[in-house]
Image (spheres, rainbow, N blue to C red):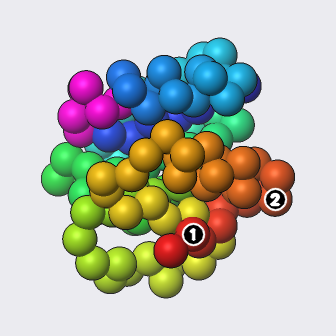
Amino acid sequence: MRALIIEKDQLIASALAESLADLGFTSFHFVLTEVDAVAVAEHWRPDFIIADVSVSMDNGIGVVATICAVHTFPTVFMIAGSQEGLNRMPEAAVLRMPFGEVALKTAVSEVMSRKRTVFIG
């Protein structure tokens, strides 16, 4: 399975890839910008997206909303602050940072079983 990781911190992105590998993901693409995320999603067609809500200069919610306007992908958002704007993606899972491996696995399992985005508070 392929995972698109939209995360500005390389250490966090690498840790996410390791955790996702434990869940059976075998291929990862790391991006920082909306342009890159949209291009990768269009051409690579990931099975799953995990996105930092505050990635780079772009808004992670807007990035995923742009991607999912064309193709829907199971998505988990990582959030450190408020949930403002998340109503644009009501089917997404939300993980409050910091979160542990169990919470990540639960969120990924939930969205993958539904093959769409899901909210977990």
Locate the N terminus and report the quarter of the image it occupies.
top right
Q: Position of residue 67 (x, y in %)?
A: 55, 53
Q: Is residue 19 above or below residue 52?
A: above
Judged by depth in the image, the label closer to the viewer, 1 or 2, is 1
Q: Is residue 62 above or below residue 28?
A: below
Q: Position of residue 74 (x, y in %)?
A: 67, 52
In this rendered view, identify the residue nearer to me: 24 or 61.
24
Whether the magenta-drawn stretch holds residue 12 is answered as yes
Give the farthest residue toward the left: 57
Q: Is residue 61 above or below residue 33?
A: below
Label 2 crowd bin: few (<14), some (14–19), many (20+), radius 10 Å: few
**Which of the numbered marks, if any, corresponds to residue 114?**
2
Distance (Cα) linking label 1 and label 2: 13 Å
Q: Amino acid at mark 1?
A: Ile
Magenta span: chief secondary structure: helix
Q: Amino acid at mark 2?
A: Arg
Q: Quadrant location of residue 119?
A: bottom right
Q: Give the residues in magenta.
A: 8-13
Q: Earlier in the sequence, mark 1 or mark 2?
A: 2
**Which residue is at a point 48% across and 25% down the rendered structure image?**
17
**Which residue is at a point 71% across and 23% down the rendered structure image?**
24
Q: Secondary structure at mark 1?
A: loop
Residue 114 visible in the shown view: yes
Label 1 crowd bin: few (<14), some (14–19), many (20+), radius 10 Å: some
Q: Position of residue 103 (x, y in %)?
A: 53, 52
Q: Secondary structure at mark 2?
A: helix
Question: Pointer 1 and pointer 2: residues touching (CB < 8 Å)?
Answer: no
Quickly name the residue at label 1: 120
Q: Quadrant location of residue 60?
A: bottom left
Count of all numbered marks drawn on residues in the image: 2
**Which of the numbered marks, if any, corresponds to residue 92?**
none
